[in-house]
Amino acid sequence: MRIGVLLRIGFSVVLFIVLSACVTSCSPERGIEQAGKTNVSLGVNQETVTLRIYENELARTPPMGWNSWNAFHGDIDEQKIRGIADAMVESGMHDAGYTYLVIDDGWMADKRNSEGKLVADPNKFPSGIKALSDYIHSKGLKFGLYQDRGHLTCMRLPGSFGYEQVDMDTFAAWGVDYIKLDSCYAEINGRKSSDDFGVFKECIIKTGRPMILSMANYTDPSWAWGGQEIGHLWRTSFDVSPQMGSVYYCADTSAGDIVIHPAFNGLWQFAGPGHWNDPDMLQVGNLKTDIENKAHFSLWCILAAPLMAGNDLRNMSETVRNILTAEELIKVNQDPRGIQGYKVHDDGDHEIYNKPLWDGTTAVLLLNKGARKADITVTWDKIGLRGRQMVRDLWQGKNLGYYSGSFTAEDLPRHGHIFLIVGSKGKPLPVPEPVPLEKYVVTQKGKTCLSDLYYIWRYGNAPKYDKTFEGKPIVIDGTPYERGFGCKATSKIMFKLNGYAERFKAVVGLDPSYQGNEAVNFRVRNEDPIGPDSLLYDSGKMTKDTPAKVIDIDVRGIDCLILAIEGKQALGNWADAQVIVSN
Ligand code: GLA
């Protein structure tokens, strides 16, 4: 294995191990201090200091705040936002930890000013953004603002492409503390997502003002290409909507196998202090019932997800207020150890999540997603414990007593759940081994069959390994292949080459079992699932009658390779998919 070749992806694992090691010997406060130490000395310039703060001090725990999008979409103005700032303080949200008030899309005028700078929409924000920022700061809150790395925002207002430094300087001058950076139209920027977000990181550092960078990259995999080193949180899902189906889908992008190979058991190993998986903002208060609001909040808390409230704080009910400010749940979310909770059981309807905490106890969520009432039992062996253990119910705020070997939550209705702390204070409990790099990164000289690696991201149908999508041996034009992938369009799968491989080879064609008339493209892409600049190979339209095509392309320097079958439903195979590293 080439030394240093795994540096980038290894960073998060190393950080994880360092932090895990630290938890056995440090108090929470010391741990945070050490992890976030800023070594300021004479002669160190402002940019260096800002870089250190940016990388080591921001978002040590998942950011908490409020964002305008889920409550108002583009229908925002300065009166509303001031009202929200007031409510955030008066309702106790701020005291509970909600710090960042973020204005999402729809705040800006549709044209830049004569100096090329962004200006606020004069009708919605006649006093300007700086005045609003000052007001928000005067309340003791921090201020966040939305932009987009394309030439337009998702609402087709002026985006930042080509104005990166100008805009970050403007944001800094306005006192912005948190940037939500969206990705609409960015596929035509001519830069990979990692490079594009990297440009903004550099621009932020240059401003000298520490600002959290929230990367809104839909489902695209920031965790795969080193997002940990660029921003502080990244989206894992499409937009959350106020329905439980959407809430569960978003949670499962982070905790399930919707976007990553099932062997990872979700994205937990990529999260930690300073870099978080973001299954999107909260819809608590916008859902139909309190049991739904609670289930949503509990999931986000155990998943160490950013807690960005998205309801109208000026009119929330007492029950919703109590959910959003539930101190013991927030404490789990904000636990300084920064472990993202992971599933220890999922049978489709019933789920159990575990989140080992700093103090030696562990948070456990038992959730019934099914339509029927159910009992759910967690046995201590699933959460690293044995014998008699103290159990505390966090929603009730009371100790339930000692339980031997297991705990059963009885008669949970749909969305019903119990959120527990189990165990007693002491040495932190172990977490599972993260998936080792060699299982998902190209590390060997010679030939690596890609079906020997776990994919690090997928979109669309999950591929079958070494079989057709229907589970049969792969045969193309009469030739059998032992290795490769069987897919059903649309199918995009990403492999981590880490800049190590030189050639990618495969034989592609539609599966003989597919007798439809659809014509699909087999495309190989560099990092980004869409956009002209990411395209490395295109088979052209292939139907069931098109003979197999042989791919043999240069992939030197490529970190993340995507194999895409772009179509609607045809079955296709990547036979013998492999990469080569010269000996
Ligand atoms: C995208 C984002 C949303 C929101 C809107 C604004 O859809 O994912 O969170 O910011 O844009 O237009």
Image (cartoon, rainbow, N blue to C red):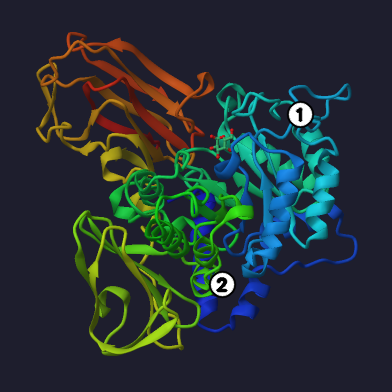
Residue at the image point whose x is 67% and y is 33% from the top: 106
The amino acid type, in three-letter code, at marker 2 is Pro
The amino acid type, in three-letter code, at marker 1 is Tyr
What is the spatial separation of the Cα atoms under label 2 and label 1, in whole angstroms? 37 Å
Marks 2,1: beta carbons within 8 A: no
Mark 1 residue CB less than 8 A from any atom of ligand 1: no
Is residue 559 visible in the rendered image? The answer is yes
In the rendered structure, the answer to whether residue 57 lies left or right of residue 295 reads right
Mark 2 residue CB less than 8 A from any atom of ligand 1: no
Is residue 3 visible in the rendered image? The answer is no
Q: Quadrant of residue 517?
A: top left
For mark 1, does the 10 Å Cα neighbourhood hold few (<14), some (14 to 19), or many (20 or more) residues? some
Q: Secondary structure at mark 1?
A: loop
Q: Is residue 52 above or below residue 183?
A: below
Residue at the image point whose x is 67% and y is 48% from the top: 102
Question: Residue 152 appears at what percent x and percent y?
Answer: 65, 24
Q: Which mark is residue 70?
A: none
Q: Is residue 526 above or below residue 241?
A: above
Residue at the image point whose x is 12% and y is 19% from the top: 512
Q: Secondary structure at mark 2?
A: loop
For mark 2, does the 10 Å Cα neighbourhood hold few (<14), some (14 to 19), or many (20 or more) residues? many
In the rendered structure, the answer to whether residue 84 lies left or right of residue 269 reads right
On the rendering, which quadrant does ligand 1 occupy?
top right
Question: Residue 25 appears at what percent x and percent y?
Answer: 54, 84
> In this orientation, which residue lies closer to the viewer: 550 or 205?
205
Q: Which residue is mark 2?
A: 336
Q: Earlier in the sequence, mark 2 or mark 1?
A: 1
Q: Is residue 140 above or below residue 461?
A: below
Q: Which mark is residue 163?
A: 1
